[in-house]
Amino acid sequence: MSMKSKGGAVELSARNVLHRKWALLLCVASFCAGMFFTNRIWSMPEYVEFPGTTSEIERIKLNSDGCNLNTVARPNSNYSKVEVSNTQNVVNNDVNNDVKRPRKSETDESSTRKKYFMVIGINTAFSSRKRRDSVRTTWMPRANERQKLEEEKGIIIRFVIGHSSTSGGILDKAIEAEERLHADFLRLNHVEGYLELSAKTKTYFSTAVALWDAEFYIKVDDDVHVNLATLALTLSMHRMKPRVYVGCMKSGPVLAQKGVKYHEPEYWKFGEVGNKYFRHATGQLYAISQDLATYISINQDVLHRYANEDVSLGSWFIGLDVEHVDDRRMCCGTPPDCEWKAQAGNICVASFDWKCSGICRSVERMKEVHLRCGEDENALWSATL
């Protein structure tokens, strides 16, 4: 009995071991089959953007409902595009609000602007038609010659004037008619007036530097005689200086007494009564380099205006690193002064009478000054700038 029992126990034990092996093998086989089956059913195809219409996409969604594919996160091409586009717009708007980028056209324009040597603005008034004509018939080239001067020498010359207090009135119409005849005006966004000369000067330089990319910007009165070639050659000696202010430098008294010419209402800013102004160029003719003209343009809203235009200009450069060039050839007297100098080979840049702040009776005398003190008519065209 004991032997049978022992033998039966051994046989039962062997069967149990065999059953466990088969069970383990069956489990492994079932697991592998399950993995294979699951991958075949649930694996997602590689994402491909459907070019189809909305109805086609909806049909694909309906056909997939039986597999419950909506529960699986899958990229939706239309949704993704909309979200990215909206996000990009938000980012672009935020950047544009913080940083003002130049438009492509502005960048291209600044890089392709024609370079000029100098811009000459002849300050004039509505009542000065005869003065302008005297300039046109003497030292200022006319019509085709002026165009040639711009193209070949880079020299631009314009009469500078604003508008009357009555916009579109008879004064403005007269200037428009003259412009159609000669095409030699630079019109400013400025209301003309004797007490507004400082404001006009700011507007002139700001307008000129915006219109023309030049090395120098010159202001001259319409009752002053100018030798253009001599002016150009004089300025060419200073073209390597970044901030230069050229003219006849002076320092006159600050006039506190009311009713006198050149009265300075803000005389108290210059110290005790009887003090003199700081050094500045006389207003009949002066030249400034491009950096200074640009400085005026940028800061025109905060630059203070004194009663006298030449004083105002000089005050704008106080405290700046500016080289003041005192050139006395820019303020010669009328004949015989400028004539003697011309005969000695020292031709003047500009001539006028101090007592008149210009050529006295310039309409009648401009031609005489030009004949006696003017440079050779070919000097400008042969000058190397």
Image: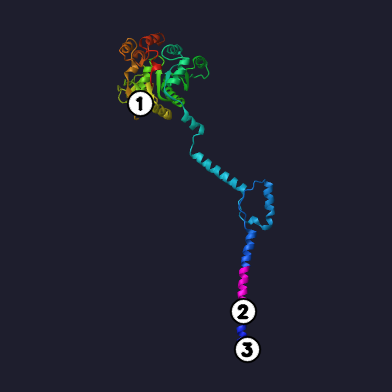
Residue 66 visible in image: yes
Other-residue count near label 1 (Cα within 10 Å), few / some / many at <14 / 14–19 / ≥20: many
Q: Is residue 303 left or right of residue 343?
A: right
Q: Which residue is mark 3?
A: 4
- Secondary structure under tag 1 reads strand
Q: Which residues are magenta?
A: 14-29
3D distance between C-alphas at marks 1 and 3: 128 Å
Q: Which residue is mark 1?
A: 244
Q: Position of residue 345 (x, y in %)?
A: 31, 14
Q: Residue at image x 40%, y 9%? A: 367
- Secondary structure under tag 2 reads helix
Residue 303 visible in image: no
Residue type for callout 2: Asn
Q: Quadrant of the C terminus?
A: top left
Q: Earlier in the sequence, mark 1 or mark 3?
A: 3
Q: Which residue is mark 2?
A: 16
Residue type for callout 1: Val
Q: Nearer the viewer, mark 1 or mark 3?
A: 3
